Image: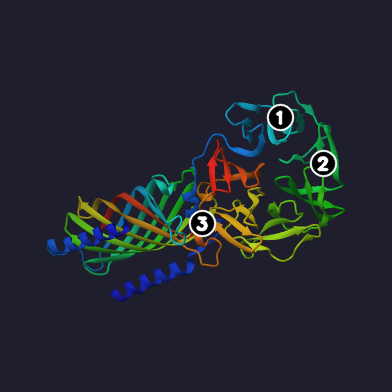
Amino acid sequence: MRRTAITILLAALCLCAFISCNIDATEGIYSEVASSTVNTDVNIKSYLGCYNDEHYYLSDEGIFKIGSGARLENSGSSIIRSASLNGATGEALVMTQKSDLSTVLEYYTAFGATPAQVTGTFKALLRNGLVYDNSAIYTVSGTTATPVISDAKVLYALETGDYAFFSVVKSDAIKYYVIKNDGTVVVDGVDGSSKTYIAFQPIADSGEFVIVSYNSSKATFEAFKLTSTGVESTVLFTMKSSLQYAYSTQAASFYYTNDGKEYIVIKASNYFDRYNITDKTIESISTGFATTLRTAGIVNIEATADPMVFVAGTYESMLYEIDMTNNKSTQIK
Amino acid sequence: MRKAFMAMLVLAVLVSGSVFARSTYYATGDQVFSFRGGVDFPAFISFVNDSDRGTVTFADTHMKLGGYASISYQGYISEYFALGGELGYAFNYSQSSLLLTTVPITAKLTYYPIQKRKFDLAASLNLGVSFVRYNGGKYITPYAQATIQPTFFFTESWGIGIESGLMASAELYGKNNNKYKSSAICGLLPVALTVAYRH
């Protein structure tokens, strides 16, 4: 009987060792639990930028300025889907969805002024001001939209800072474009693929970009360099951690230089991954500026006038200033 | 905390074994069914491969008080030991109000240092696996549980008692896995009411 008992116990232990496995956790389950945060009633959808030293953000209730009430509030018949703020002039574009599900793009000389409708019907407005419909990508000046790329159906777009990456179908082929918010086409219709990229980061204004995709066969996130000639086939680096959101596009990254070296920082699930472009090394960061932000759900990170300072908006309805000179982050809302 | 618990468990077993007379109530071949339900307190989450995060305890686990229930069957393999299996279910909500569920399936070995007609004191060790789910993620983890159970029998067969101890699940990843630093051991402290039927 005792032998039977020991056999059963050993069998249980072996079973335990053999079948213990991850089925579908995108990040460690207990890691996610320990990083969970209290839900707030208002979630930031996008940090819009700074105008006259005041920070603006789009939440699920409308457009707000820190320290004051709504600049532009959702109503029952009109919900703000996206917005773009020109930090130099205070001009803004706002895309709203009406109760009949149609969308309207409006131009504001300033929040609070009477809007004017931009001529045309558009599918999406990016934070940097580029818009697109089912056949073209446009820049907008005042109430006039000017096509930059025509006869192209956008499959998806990624944006960080002034630049946006577009995967489009043009002449029955998938092509990639990178367009600056002033309409400059930096990557002009290079051959693309059905692969979906989920993060995008310009390397300053060098004309080179880093794009990240998920490699399902290896269960890793791989970064590639994108230039005017296309996406390089060689993996630039493999992220140390899972990307913050494994399957949705995101703009939670930034670029900076320090001591003559260039860095790209990308938000991962519970860390920031920092890629040293100069030395071609990658590391996970959980201290310094990342101490608080590593568990935050970041919606976007935008550069400021200071090349070492960035502002991050989070789903938890907070804005943080990231100061890479002093390696710290400070809550500003 | 784990060390303290294990020390208490060992002490309870040793003291009880020496203080009480060693007359036995059970015989090989006896059986016991038991049902339990109660609460579980989040005890700790230990990130074994991430020294920056280390071990977080109680409220810092970002888990709320949860619930626990199980059913077990054991047969006595000697006068002092019973062996069998247990199926459990534990749930906790995270701070984000998302549900974490743990379903342990274990082999269970119980030692009865005190066994009277009206009262038992038992110490159990469970080993097995648990199916863990949270926010769309699933994981099958190694699972271990150590508990003590005083039980009062109000009839020859039926008894009621309380059970407490430590339940631990280990979510482990290899060095080549990008979730390596997320490897963690999660501990829960169950406090449950037990109903036992023996014959």
Crowding near the residue tagged with mark 1, few <14, some 14–19, many ≥20 C-alpha atoms within 10 Å: few
Q: Earlier in the sequence, mark 2 or mark 3?
A: 3
**Residue identified by numbered label 1:** A99
Indicate the secondary structure of the residue bearing disc 2.
strand
| Rendered location of residue B135, percent (x, y) | 53, 49
Image coordinates for residue A317, horizontal then vertical, percent: 56, 37
Taking the image as shown, residue A259 lies to the left or right of residue B117, namely right
Q: Residue at position x 18%, y 55% from top?
A: B119
For image coordinates 46% across by 46% down, the residue present is B94
Give the residue number, with chain letter if any, for mark 2.
A138
Nearer to us in this view, A263 or A116: A263
- Residue B186 visible in the picture: yes
In-image side of A299 versus A192 (left or right): left
Residue depth check, mark 3 versus mark 1: number of the one nearer the observer: 3
Q: Amino acid at mark 3?
A: Gly
Q: On what subunit does the disc labeled 1 rest?
A: A
Q: Which residue is mark 3?
A: A28
**Quadrant occupied by the N terminus of chain A:** bottom left
Circle 3: element type? loop
Is tag 1's residue or tag 2's residue first in the polypeptide sequence?
A: 1
